[in-house]
Amino acid sequence: MSSPPSDERHRVTLRCETGPRWLTNALANLDEVLIDHAHCEKKAAANALSLLQAYPDVPGLPAHMARLAREESGHLARVLQLLERRGLALGRDPGDPYAQALRALVRTPAAQRQLDRFLIAAIIEARSCERLALLARGLPDAELRRFYGELARSEDGHQKLFLRLASRMHGPETWPRLEQLLDVEAELIRRLPIRAAIH
Ligand SMILES: [Fe+2]
Ligand SMILES: [Fe+2]
């Protein structure tokens, strides 16, 4: 099993690229995508605080998660502003079948549970990064393109953070589990219907 030589190399490499139909559909239903995106940022902020609550003893984690929750809340506030400008209401979260399917893979024993939570967070951040970058290239509006480019870079930093936490705490066990989860994630991307949503 391969193991990256240094923390700096840590990065999730997705195994299934998002196809062009996702972007076409997203651009045709941008309002729905923006609403879903707001819910994603809300859940990312909530997940950071939930990890802080669950793992206060992991070195560095409380500070990282506090910063992450602040950053994700900042993204949420900016997406909510976009919604307001477009006269859109947030509404209730209809749920995200992709993230739910990944979270269902979290194992029960404490150490495995922690590794899985870090890795699944890293994978969701990596997929979000890929799709926000597609929006950054494909949107007709220059301001929105810049906004999504900035957010894509930020989510890229988050996937690296989660992968670093995973490997620091779980060492070589990290890599085979990451491989397994990446295979499942690729299968989900192929199998789930395309939605007007980030995932
Ligand atoms: Fe975010
Ligand atoms: Fe993020």
Image (tube, helix red, strand yellow):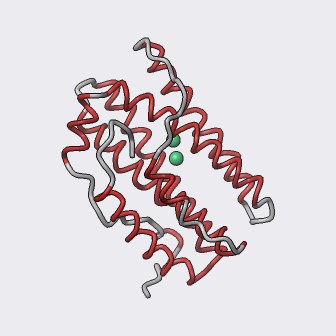
Q: Residue at coordinates 30% horizontally, 48% vertically from top-left? A: 193
Specify the farthest residue to the bottom.
1
Q: Position of residue 155 (x, y in %)?
A: 47, 48
**Residue nearest the viewer, comparing 35 with 128:** 35
Location of the N terminus (image quadrant): bottom left
Q: Position of residue 123 (x, y in %)?
A: 46, 60
**Residue nearest the viewer, comparing 93 with 3:** 93
Q: Residue at coordinates 31% horizontally, 37% vertically from top-left? A: 136
- In which quarter of the view is residue 168 placed? bottom right
Q: Count every numbered label the image shows and give the total.
A: 0
Location of residue 63 with respect to 145 vertically, above or below: below
Q: Residue at coordinates 61% horizontally, 71% vertically from top-left? A: 107
Location of residue 28 with respect to 129 vertically, above or below: above
Answer left or right for 21 relative to 77.
Answer: left
Q: Residue at coordinates 29% horizontally, 62% vertically from top-left? A: 16
Location of residue 45 with respect to 60 vertically, above or below: above
Q: Position of residue 39 (x, y in %)?
A: 52, 35
**Residue nearest the viewer, comparing 82 with 143:** 82
**Residue nearest the viewer, comparing 67 with 122:** 122
Q: Position of residue 111 (x, y in %)?
A: 69, 75
Answer left or right for 74 relative to 94.
Answer: right
